[in-house]
Image: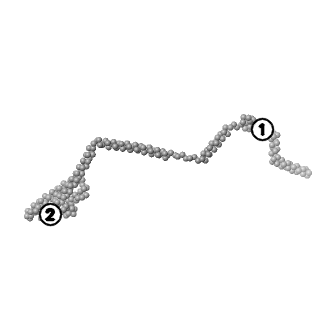
Amino acid sequence: MPFNRNHVRSFLAKTEIGLFESSLGADLKALSAAEVQRRIDRTRKLRDKYRDLLRRQKLATRARTGSKRGLSGVANERTAKKAKAFEETLARFEAQAKHLAAAAEKAAKKAAAKAKKSPAEAKPAAGKKKAAKTGTKAGTKASTKAAAKTAAKKRAPKKQPVPAAVVLRGALEKKRDAKVLALAKRPTRSAKAPARSPAAATGGVSATPPDVRAAAVASRINQSGMARIQGHTGTQVRNAQAKRDQLD
């Protein structure tokens, strides 16, 4: 039965226990090829050491006790356990070293096969990549043009229908402007109209005769009632003067 961690703690030193435990389970898988090789060398030395020690102890015990096997005594049994424990440890390290070497050889062969790939096989692959790249560029250009057209359609403003009232108002305004223009172009006087007076032609006012002016003033006085007021005032003045004359 192989030794485990609990077994070896009773007869191995602390440094030897660490070496033994590094050959078990996950600790062994975590080691690199170089680390495994260093542990193989150390474990082999310890195994050989305890084998030689066990052989010398057997010879001494046989000579002292007369036993053919020479295994009597606690010291001999302890040494035998150490030799066996390191023999098992060495076997595990060597198996892991072989596993790592096989994995490295497989990876090297795979890399060599990839490096020896013929140029004839590489060219079609390059051509396919180029064609795919060209197709991708063409597809990208087409999609860009389509997107630009769609954006232009979205940006173009839609023509809104003009209301009928606006159209009618515009027509009426045009008609009115046409009438005003026609009136502005018409002559101010007819060719058969009598000639204006010099004063009217120059924009001034002609002189009014004296008799006409007096008649106009008299008419305005009659209309305002001033003549009656003046006549009444004159009568009062004359009556007052007559009274003063009688008193004198």
Residue 207 to residue 111: above or below: above
Label 1: few (<14), some (14–19) or many (≥20) C-alpha neighbours in 10 Å? few
> The N terminus is located in which quarter?
bottom left
SS for callout 2: helix
- Marks 2, 1: nearer the viewer: 2
What amino acid is at disc 1? Ala
Helix, strand, or loop for circle 1?
loop
Q: Residues within 10 Å of mark 2 (few under 14, many from 20)?
A: few
**Quarter of the figure with residue 49:** bottom left
Residue occupying the point 20% across, 57% down: 92
| Residue 95, image x, y percentages | 20, 55
What is the tally of numbered marks visible in this picture? 2
Residue 184 location (% of width, % of height) = 67, 39
The residue located at (14%, 65%) in the rendering is: 74
> Who is closer to the viewer here, 228 or 173?
173
The answer, for residue 180, to whether it is visible in the render is no
User: Tags 2 and 1 in contact by the CB under 8 Å rule?
Assistant: no
Viewer-side residue, 157 vs 245:
157
Q: In the drawing, does residue 158 fall left or right of residue 220?
A: left
Marked residue nearer the N-terminal end (2 or 1): 2
When asked about the image quadrant of residue 46, the answer is: bottom left
Residue to which mark 1 is pinned: 207
Q: Which residue is mark 2?
A: 77
